[in-house]
Image (spheres, rainbow, N blue to C red):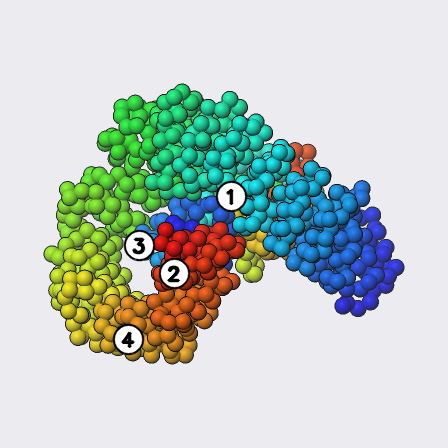
Amino acid sequence: MTAPRDPGTVRARVRAPEEEIRYRAAGELDAAREDERELLLGMLGDPSWRVRSVAVERIVTTGSVNEVLPALLGLLSGGANVGMRDASAAALARLGADAVLPLVARLDGPDADLRQAAASVLGVIGDRRAVVPLAARLADPDPNVRAGAAEALGKIGGPEAGATLLAALDSDEHTLRLSALEALLAMRVCPPAARVRPLLEDKALRRPAYRVLGFSDEPEAGALLAGGLAEGSRGAREAALAGIGTQRTRRSAGELRHLADAVAAAVRDGADVRSSAASLEADDVAVCVGALSVLGWGGAVSEVGAMLRLAEDDRLRPFVEDSVEALPRGQGLRDAIAAALEGQGPFGRIAALALLSRLGSPAALEALVREASDPSGYLQAEAIAALGHLGDARAVPPLTGLLGDDAPAVSGIAATALVHIGQESAEARAAALAALRDRFDTSPSASLFRVLGALGAAEDLPRLRAGLRRPAVVQRMAAAGAIASLAQRGALAGEELPELVAALGDGTWSVRAAAARALVEVARAGVARGAGPLPQPAIDGLHARLGDPEPAVRAAAVEALGATGEARHAPAIAALARASDVPPVVVLAAVRALVTLGHPPADVISRAADHADPEVVKEAISAAAKLPGPEGERLLREAAGNTRWDVRQAAARAMVERGDPALRATAEALARHEVDPLVARAFADAARALSGR
Amino acid sequence: MSEEEFRLLRAVIHEHCGLWYRDGSAYLLEKRLQPRLQALGLADFAAYHRYLKFDPGREAELDEAADILTTNETYFYREPYQLRAFTREILPALAETNAPLRRLRILSAGCSTGEEVYTLAALVKESGLFEGWDVELVGSDISRRCVAQARAGAYGEHAFRMPDAAPMRRWFHLRGGKWVVDEALRSTVRFQRENLVAANALSTVSRLDVVFCRNMMIYFDLQARRALLKRLHQKMRRGAWLLLGHSESLINVTADFELVHLTNDLVYRKPAGAAEDGT
């Protein structure tokens, strides 16, 4: 509590005509003092929003809940002063859990305005204790209270609120059905498509119904959304586009196949794609994405210019590229793009050039190469990536030239682009390898090593081994990484790698770590071939690195020893994990390695499950799935109640991994009560998997 | 990018620089960060998350990620109605209130590649109200790449795409296919790279008369918005102006600024009676 102030001065400032004086006075008041608390409560009705706002802040930060709560509840009915009611609602929302039960009690009061206000605040607080009492208010005699309760349930979310709102869709009362549907939309929960279908017949429900279909995973939703393209009113049509756009942002290309087919069929049946083109200008991103998708799937070649112009918007660019790719190829598209090129912004131009190049235009390819080679342009990376996606061997020479670029972002993207091209066909790979090998003697950059690892063969191994002796650290690291890639791709056949073992003792930690990581892949490849473990010098080198001062090196060495599959290394790894003050990355690698080696020690797993770092905990939970006996199950159940969503999700995955049907009931219960939709889905999946369905 | 990877990555990024990606915007993060996976040779976003958590190079990579995520292409004379309010009402008011000191300080928070700062500098010059004054415009952005480009002051044709931007060309010279800013304009501006949400942000900036903070807070969560506004408030003079993007407001964020109705725009202002240090 602050020192006493002169009450007369305080009152004068609180009542001063100047807003700023009142604002500053409110900021100095202390709600723990009875006289000042009264002043602050009175200021909730101040004509200035700034004063009301700071009064709310002071009431909730300096007052005790017991003293301010009754007064705030009293003000919630507000009378004629809307500002006061809103400010007291804001303060109650800030009080959070403490205000829930008193607000729930107000839901049964005689004053409908108060019931509605209480429901609204409960929605903002989001406490699930309010779900049942709010559900009861869906039958309130006052329609505004019913709508307010539905909205609040939508904000609180969770399975119980969702089920209640779904039931409300069957109500005879139109306003309640609308509120429930909008609340489900806020929750991003779509009712079964069969239940949405009749709602589309209702003019007032049509828009939220189309939008909520965006969150459906049922194939039927695609047909309903495509049907919406023929709606007569622009509002309903754009709602259908928003639903399509939402589907597009949520789902993979494979999952969207039904929707794409349905849209194409709707267009064939006469749905007007020009109206979708008009919606490209909409403010709502979901509508724009929907419109792009419809134009792409519907083959609206003539709209390609308008589609490309949206590439300047960062949020829409990925959808522009995908949608123009979906347009039917041919001279018509080529002409349409060429005609539209002039009016494009920089990103639209790159997308247009890439598409023209793919359609066989040498001039466009040259223009793209020029953009890719212009270091001053911020579109350079975009152009390089576009060249890679072409999959055209003609792009190999310019991209190979960029592998030596000083900017790692440029050379790295060029390397990825070359890998893309090399993976397109045997001819493209041969062209890329010829260019790489040719360039190796003059400028063996780190990025060149990377591409060589990704596309090369055993005949490139001498080049990579030589790379491990190069003076530049980045090249030695990259050479080790490239050997790892060759091993991963099965391109090695047990060749001697003395340079790699020597690199474990390199003076630079990043090279030592890269060498150890390469040995992970070499060891795995050996195991996969059924060949023996790593040569003894490599094993000795890795054991020596368990004491490396750099945690990243220790972790990589642990992982490599684990990858040998030889149980004899387990004691050394477990000892490392049991030591005090071990960095999280090392514990994580140790847990993983011990699992690979079989029978991880329970004490190591239990300790890791209690670790402060959630990544370690998740690894331990994954390992606990394989722990025999009650300890493993105990760890899984504990993790399922963790405060972090990602740990709970890891627990759900581990339950599946453990495969113990006795955990099914637990998973089902967790799925029912889980607040986080992603985790709830994971527990539901686990329950299904454990029941054998 | 799976939803799990999205959530984990957005948490790491939020912790680093206050940027907040809403549910359903995984594709944005994926598109922007994909080149980083390529540059680092990582297989997937789970590996990238692990890199950002544990790799010894994580701090540098977090800066790199912030750089990529905050690089937004912009253009001259953006939101012209607001710039007209700035020219017709705010600058004349400042010419009067600041006349005793003959000093003007303007900040463009989240200046991206500098188009806004150069636009403001041109408007100040063209107003003719501040001849011989000590004028400085500061552009601040977290992206190293953006700040470098802003300092270079070289732009493509597309930066002039707004019809109102046509007169801006008089401050630029066409060199090697780029429009390069004239020294007379460049000398009144400076750019600095910093994280405006950090506690020590704007420590090298003196008391500000106008802050443009347009379309930047939309990328922040409430906590980061409040931190930023508190910092700006502390650095502003009493009566200094705050201009936000057309879709932004301070409702439910802070009450430290008052809303001012200009003839054609609504802007915010640090109250004339407020304490200079923002308390």
Say whether mark 3 and mark 2 are on the same chain.
no
Residue nearest the observer in this picture, B148 or A575: A575
Label 3's element? loop
The residue under label 4 is A570
Q: Position of residue A448 (x, y in %)?
A: 22, 53
Q: Residue furthest top?
A: A270
Residue at 18% from the left image edge and 42% from the top image edge: A425
The local secondary structure at tag 1 comes to loop
Query: Label 3 neighbourhood size at 10 Å, few (<14), some (14-19), many (20+)?
Result: few
User: Disc 2 versus disc 4: distance between alpha carbons?
Assistant: 30 Å
Label 3–label 1 contact, CB within 8 A: no
The alpha-carbon separation of the residues under discs 1 and 2 comes to 31 Å
Q: CA distance from mark 3 to mark 4?
A: 28 Å
> Percent from the top left, x then y, of residue A190?
50, 40
Q: Chain of mark 4?
A: A
Measure how far apart labels 3 and 1 are at the Cα level. Answer: 31 Å
Task: Describe residue A126's horizontal placement relative to residue A403 as left or right.
Answer: right
Q: Position of residue B260 (x, y in %)?
A: 70, 41
- Residue assigned mark 2: A661
**Quarter holding residue A421:** top left
- Which residue in the protein does label 3 denote? B43
Q: Are marks 3 and 1 on the same chain?
A: no
Residue type of the residue flagged with mark 1: Arg
